[in-house]
Image (cartoon, rainbow, N blue to C red):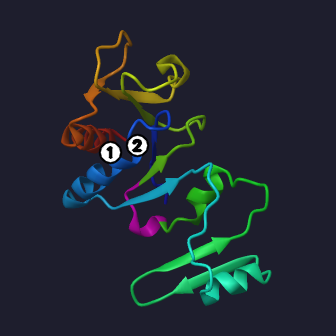
Amino acid sequence: MTVPLLAISAWSGTGKTTLLEQVIPQLKAQGIRSGLIKHTHHQMDIDSPGKDSYLLRKAGADQVIVASNKRWALMVETPNQTPSLAELAFRMDCSVLDLILIEGFKNEPVPKIVLWRRDIPGQIEDLIDEHVIAVATDEDLKIDLPYLDINQPQQITDFIIQWLKSL
């Protein structure tokens, strides 16, 4: 089963996470089950220092699963190697998803909505490629793509739903 991928791409500080925090519940309210893959350039740990999972991972386990009756997480050590988007998407349980949203990975060849705000450093042209299906912005740009209002998450949600229906 193939689940569509849709990236939300923008320069740092544009509001990708904030927008996704608003869009995901709106998609869920429409019955669309979404997964999320987020790329970060920062050092990250999802378990806390001192916890058993942290101690065992630091002891040398290359993969650690932590499970409870509410959720589970798989931590995989990838020293100096960022997994590809395809590898990460393959790890998702596509049997329970309708869509995989991607935050970051702006250079991947997947459909994407580009976010653009005035006063954010960087050039819009550097974000646009043949995979961009829309631009969500707060200014009038001279680009031949569908425009969405970045400050109207419901409009962006509606666009995503229509996009999914067109697949």
Q: Calculate the distance from the C-alpha at mark 1 to the C-alpha at mark 2.
A: 5 Å
Snapshot quadrant of residue 153: top left
Depth check: 143 or 4 in front? 143
For the record, the magenta segment spans: 94-99
Depth check: 129 or 4 in front? 129
Horizontal side of 113 relative to 50 (left or right) equals left
Do the CB atoms of the residues marked 1 and 2 lie less than 8 Å apart? yes
- Of the residues shown, which amino acid type is indicated by label 1? Leu
Residue 167 lies, with reference to residue 128, above or below; the image says below
Tell me the residue at 22%/54% (across/down). Answer: 26
Q: What element carries label 1?
A: helix
Residue 154 lies, with reference to residue 11, above or below; the image says below
User: Which residue carries the number 1 mark?
Assistant: 19
| Quarter of the figure with the C terminus | top left
Magenta stretch contains residue 47: no
Query: Where residue 39 sits in the image (x, y, percent)?
Result: 57, 50
Checking the image for residue 16, the label placed there is 2
Tell me the residue at 52%/53% (across/down). Answer: 38
Query: Where residue 59 sits in the image (x, y, percent)?
Result: 78, 84
